[in-house]
Image (cartoon, rainbow, N blue to C red):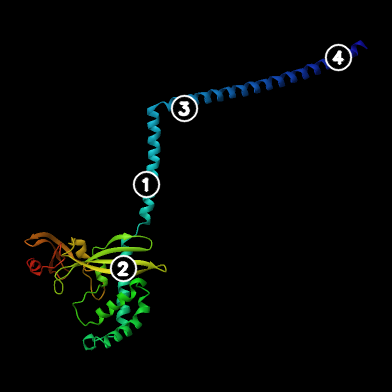
Amino acid sequence: MYQEVIPIYIKLRIIFLFLMSIIVLSACTDYEAILKENSQKAKEQRELAESTADDEANKNDPEQEAKEEKIENVNENDHQEARKEKADTDAPNPAEIQQIVEISVNEIHQIVQNRTDKIDWKKLDINTERDAALEKALQKLINPLSAVVAADNLHRHAEEFIEIFTCQCDSMHMFRDTDTRAGFTIIDYSDDAFEAESITLTDGALYSSGWKNKWSFKKEDGYWKFNDYDVIYADREPLDVTFEDIEHSFYDYETNEKLQVEFVEYTDEADGHYIVVQMPDQSYMAYHTELGLANFELGESYQ
C-alpha cells in the first residue's frame, strides 16, 4: 500500500509545481506590462515638460519670434497672390469686350439702314413737316433698336441715327465697326457697365485729324447694350499712334479681313513724329503719331 501512495504523491506534487509556475509566470508578465506602462508615462511627461520649456524659451527669443512672423507673412502673401490671381481671372478680356462693341455697332447700322426711309430734310417744312417725318421714322426704329441700345438714351440716339443716315452728306460723323478695332482699351469695367476707347486714323479728306472713340455700354436684362458714344479729336487729346494701331486700321471692304501692313521706320519731320508703313499694293503711307493723319507726300517719298 505504501508503494501505491508514493506514485500518487509524486503526481500531485508535479501538478502543484506546474500550477505554481503558471501563477508566477502570469505575475511576471503583469509586472512587465506595468513597468512598460509606467515607462511610457514617464517618457510622455518628460516630452511635455521639454515642450513647455521650449515654448517658454521661444516666447523670450526675438529670433524665434521673427521667424514665426516671417512664416505668417509668407502665408499671408500667398493668400494675397491667390486673391490677385482670382481678380485677374475675373478681369474682362479686352478682345471679348472689343467684339461686343463691334457687333453692337454692326447691328445698329443694319437696323437703321433697314428701317429708315430716305428723307430729304431740305424739302420739308421745318415747322410742320419735319417733326411728323421724324416721328414716323422713330416709330419704325425704336422697337428694334431697343434690343441693342440702352433705354436711357434710346430716343436721343435714335433721332441722331435717323438724321445722320438720311442727311445724304458725308460731313456728319457716324461711327462704324472699323472704328472699334485700333487702339482698343478698356477704361472702366464693372458687372453692369463698362467704358472703352479706340482710335480712328484719317487720310485728311474729310477730317483734319484722327480721333478717339469713347464707348459706353451698360447691361440690361442680362445683355450688353450701347449706351453712349463720344468723339475726341486729336487737337484735344493726342492719339499716340503705334504701328499696331495702323495694323488694325486697314481691312478689305469685301472680305473684312485685316490687310497685311509692313512696318518701315519711324521718322521725325518738321511737323512731328511719323510711322512709315508699306501697304499690300507696295505703296507707302506715313501717319502722324499725335494726329493720326496721313501725310501722302512723305509716303510717296519712299516709292
Distance of mark 2 from mark 1, alpha carbons?
A: 32 Å
| Residue kind at label 2, given as amino acid type | Val
Q: Which mark, by number, is residue 55?
A: 3
Distance of mark 3 from mark 2, alpha carbons?
A: 63 Å
Horizontal side of residue 291 vs 216, given as left or right: left
3 above or below 284? above
Distance of mark 3 from mark 1, alpha carbons?
A: 32 Å
Task: Please name the residue that numbered disc 2 is placed on.
Answer: 101
| Residue kind at label 4, given as amino acid type | Tyr
Task: Residue 190: give x, y in percent of width and height.
Answer: 36, 60
Q: Which is more foreground, mark 2 or mark 4?
A: 2
Distance of mark 4 from mark 1, alpha carbons?
A: 90 Å
Dot 3 or dot 2: first in sequence order is 3
Q: Which is more foreground, mark 3 or mark 1?
A: 3
Q: Dividing the picture into quarters, in which one does residue 277 lie?
A: bottom left
Q: Which mark, by number, is residue 81?
A: 1
| Residue kind at label 1, given as amino acid type | Glu
